[in-house]
Every structure is written in structure tokens, then in C-alpha cells.
Amino acid sequence: MPIRTAFSTVACPKWDFDTIAARAKEYGYEGVEIRGFVNESILTASNVFLTDPVKLKSLFNYHGIEIACLASSIAMTGNKRRDKRLADDCKRFIDAAAQLNCGLVKIFDTEVHPGQSRASAGIAFGDWLVPLGDYAAQHDMTIVVENTLSFRDAKEMWLILDRISHPSIGACWDVFNAALIGEAPSTSVPVLNSKIQYVQVQDATLGALGATYCKLGEGEVPVEKFIWRLLGIGYNGWITFEWEKAWLANIAEPEEVLPDAVKKLKDWINPPKEEDPKAKHKAAAAAKA
């Protein structure tokens, strides 16, 4: 199966699900990542937990668009009571994704707290994650962990995932988050390899005062090189474009960035093949004949 493209609903916080599915089809995407909200402020007009899953699945099927991933902001905290609630939230996401025929649920990694070693934080996160992986396996689902908080480094993410070695837990690799710590795709992709089960991309200029988001290919995040590396390991999952309009009201509107993003992603996924010199010569000879 070839690589497929999607965008996250955080890019279009004012759109309802009907608009989202219709625009995805119009622009040329194969899927959509739905950002869900449980026990937090709802920042989009399209909340999966307030929608009939049967009707929602039917709506996306009608437009020929898949639900690529059900995304959350769940991240283990190290507080036992809070982490129990977060684990229950994750199960709610898994249940909802199963009803939608969506095979992936995305969570964040964890933060290293003062006085805690990185190794111990990674071990604690893995121990918390394993029972959720078992729950996901029972529902034929996969949990993918995004490199968002303290574990943006591929080697550390690999150590966490390799230690638990769970078939229903993988990595969601965000090339932008890796770029923030100076890690290139030439390091990230070979290190994680088949542990990469889902990827997301965005571009920005990176400076001392933070990131300024921009269209793909216009910033300093090596998205095209990232895709080359993914092709090199035979990756055949989703590439999801993220545009954080839900949190950053002043960035460009989805109507401007989403069509541009999918065109560039498809060009990079399927670069034009160099013409065979012999075929070119024969064509020229035939044209003269």
C-alpha cells in the first residue's frame, strides 16, 4: 500500500465534520486525523465524542475519506491518580477509534521532572503504557507515541519502545519536533525504522525566539528529506500535515495551506522519474522520421 496523506482537524477548528470530509476529498487527501478532546477544553467545532460514531463513519465513507488517526494530548504525568484517569481517557479514545474503523490512537510521550533521570522517566512511561497496549491489541488497534515533550530524540524513543517491545505500540514521528532539538531525518528514520507507525509534518523558520510557521518547503524543517528517508525504509503508512490553527489564531487559514501541503507531499512521495536516455533518443528519432 502506498503512502497516504492526511491533515489534522486542528488546522480547521471552525469546520464541522461534513466540511472537513468534503474539503479533504476536494483537495486530494486520502484521510483526516481527528483531534479528540476529553477532560479538556474543546478547541474545534468537530468533537468526535459529541458525535454519533455510526453517522460519522458513514459521512467519511460517503466522501471516500479515511480516518487516519484519532489524536489526543494524553501524556503520562508521574502522578498515580492523574495517570489512572489518563489511562481511562486513552481507553475511551481506543473504544471510539474502534467504532470508527480507525486503527491508530495517538498520545504524547512524557516529561522528565526535576530530580528524575531520563532513563527512569522512560522506564516509568513504558510501564504505564504496556497495559494500554494490551487494551489496544484487544481492539485490533495501535497506540502511537508522538515525540512531543521530553523524548524528541530518536535513540531515546527507540529505547523506550524496544524495552517494552509491544506489537500494538509504535512511534508517531514528528519531523518538526525532532528539528527543534537539531535532529535530522538521516538520524531519526534509520534509528527508529519499522517502529515508525505514523508520521506528521509541518514547516517553520526556527529562531532564538521560537518557530514561525510557514507552508511546506518554505522553512527550515527538512520535510522533503524526511520523506526520502521514509521511502528508503519502505514506510507505507500515513503522512499527516499539521497546522496548529486551533491554538494559533493568527496563522494562515486552512483554505490557503491545506491544498498547498497535499500537492507538495504528493510530489515528494512520487517524484518524477528521470527519463531513460535511450528512450529519449528513440523518441527524438521517431519524431524526425
Image (tube, rainbow, N blue to C red):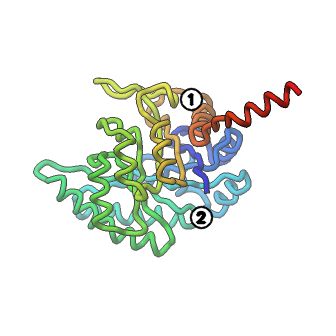
The residue that appears at 49% across and 42% down in the rendered structure is: 228
Q: Which residue is mark 1?
A: 253
Quadrant of the image containing the C terminus = top right
Q: Is residue 210 positioned above or below 159 on the image?
A: above
Rendered location of residue 251, percent (x, y): 49, 27
Q: How many marks?
A: 2
**Counting other residues with Cα less than 10 Å from the Cα at mark 2, is it few (<14), some (14-19), or many (20 or more)?**
some
Residue type marked 1 = Glu
The residue that appears at 33% across and 69% down in the rendered structure is: 130
- Let me know if residue 205 appears in the view: yes
Rendered location of residue 144, percent (x, y): 42, 57
Sequence-wise, which precedes: disc 2 or disc 1?
2
Quadrant of the image containing the N terminus = bottom right
The residue that appears at 18% across and 52% down in the rendered structure is: 118
Rendered location of residue 49, percent (x, y): 52, 57
CA–CA distance in space, label 2 to label 1: 29 Å
Q: Which residue is mark 2?
A: 101
